[in-house]
Image: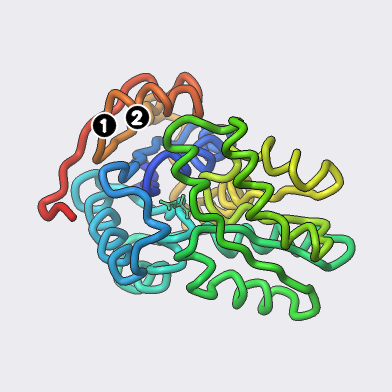
Amino acid sequence: MRERPLGMFDSGFGGLTVARAVLDLLPHEELVYIGDTGRYPYGPRRLAEVRVFAHQITATLVERFGVKLVIVACNTASAAALEELQRDSPVPVLGVIEPGVRALVSATRNRRVGVIGTVGTIRSGAYQRAVHEADSEVALTSLACPGFVEFVERGETDSDQVHVLAERLLAPARTAAVDTLLLGCTHYPYLARTISDVLGREVVLVSSADETAFEVMHLLDELDLARPAYAPPPRPRFISSGDVVWFRELGSRLLGPELATAESIAWDVER
Ligand code: DGL
C-alpha cells in the first residue's frame, strides 16, 4: 500500500497549483493527476453533475491507478462531493476547502476576510459554513468570479482583459476592506499578480495549495502510508480528458518540467 501513488484531480489546470506544492513537499511520493479538461469548467455546472464527475474520477484513480489516497484539488468538486467521496471511497479523500480556510483565518489581522471562487463553489455555501465554523467572529465577503478559470485554461493570466474583469469582480472586496483574500479556486493562484495589482499589495492572498500538501504529509504519517525510501524514484503521471497536446504545453509552463508528457483518458459516458 505504501508504494502506491497519490491520486489527484481537478477540472483542468487549476489543481496543478496543489500538485506543485505536493511535489515540492513530498518529492519521494508518486503522483497520478487527472485534469478533466474535456469537461471543464466545473464552476457553472450544477453541483449534482459535478458530483457525478467527482465520483467517476475518484473511482478511476482507485480502481485503475491503484492510488492510496485521493486529493480533490478542486474547490467546486470539494464543495459538491467531498463528504460523499469520503464516505464511499475505500481510500482516504482530502479536499482543499478546510486547509484553505485554516490558512485564511490565521492570516487575517483586521478580521475582515474575502473568499473568491467559482459560481458553483460560492453558491454551495461551503466556504461560508467552513469560515463560520473556524471563526464565527470574522466578517466574510464571498465573491464568485465567473470567467477567471477560462482565462487560465487559455493560458492568459495577465492580459488587459483579465485585469478589467478582475477590477469589476473584486470591487466588493475592496469596499469591504478585507486584509486577506482566499483564492478559493485552484486556478486562481495563476492570476495572483493580476488580483494583487487590483487589490493592492497590502491585501494578503492565501491559496490552499501549501496547506493541503501539509495535510497530505500529516495524513500519510498518521496512517503509516508514506512511500518507503527504498522504492524506485517516482515518476509523476499527468492525464487529461481533453486536448493532451495543449495539456502538456500549457501544463509544463504552469507546473514546470515534471509535466514533460501527458496521457489521454476517455470517459465511458461523455457529457
Ligand atoms: N479549479 C476548480 C476549482 O477549484 C474548478 C474550476 C472550474 O472548472 O470551473 O473550483
Q: Quadrant of residue 135?
A: bottom right
Q: Which residue is mark 1?
A: 243
- Find numbered disc 2 in the image and state the secondary structure of the residue it sits on: helix
Q: Which residue is mark 2?
A: 247
CB at disc 1 and ligand 1 closer than 8 Å: no
Residue 17 located left or right of residue 80: right
Cα separation, mark 1 vs mark 2, equals: 6 Å
- Find numbered disc 1 in the image and state the secondary structure of the residue it sits on: loop
Residue 140 located left or right of residue 237: right
Query: Relative to residue 11, is residue 132 depicted above or below?
Result: below
Q: Which mark is residue 143?
A: none
Q: Are the residues flagged by discs 1 and 2 in contact, CB closer than 8 Å?
A: yes
Q: Residue at x 38, y 42 (%)?
A: 12
> Residue placed farthest to the left in the image?
268
> Residue placed farthest to the right in the image?
110
Query: Relative to residue 80, is residue 169 depicted above or below?
Result: above
Quarter holding the C terminus?
bottom left
Image location of residue 105, percent across then percent down: 75, 64
Q: Tag 2: residue type?
A: Phe
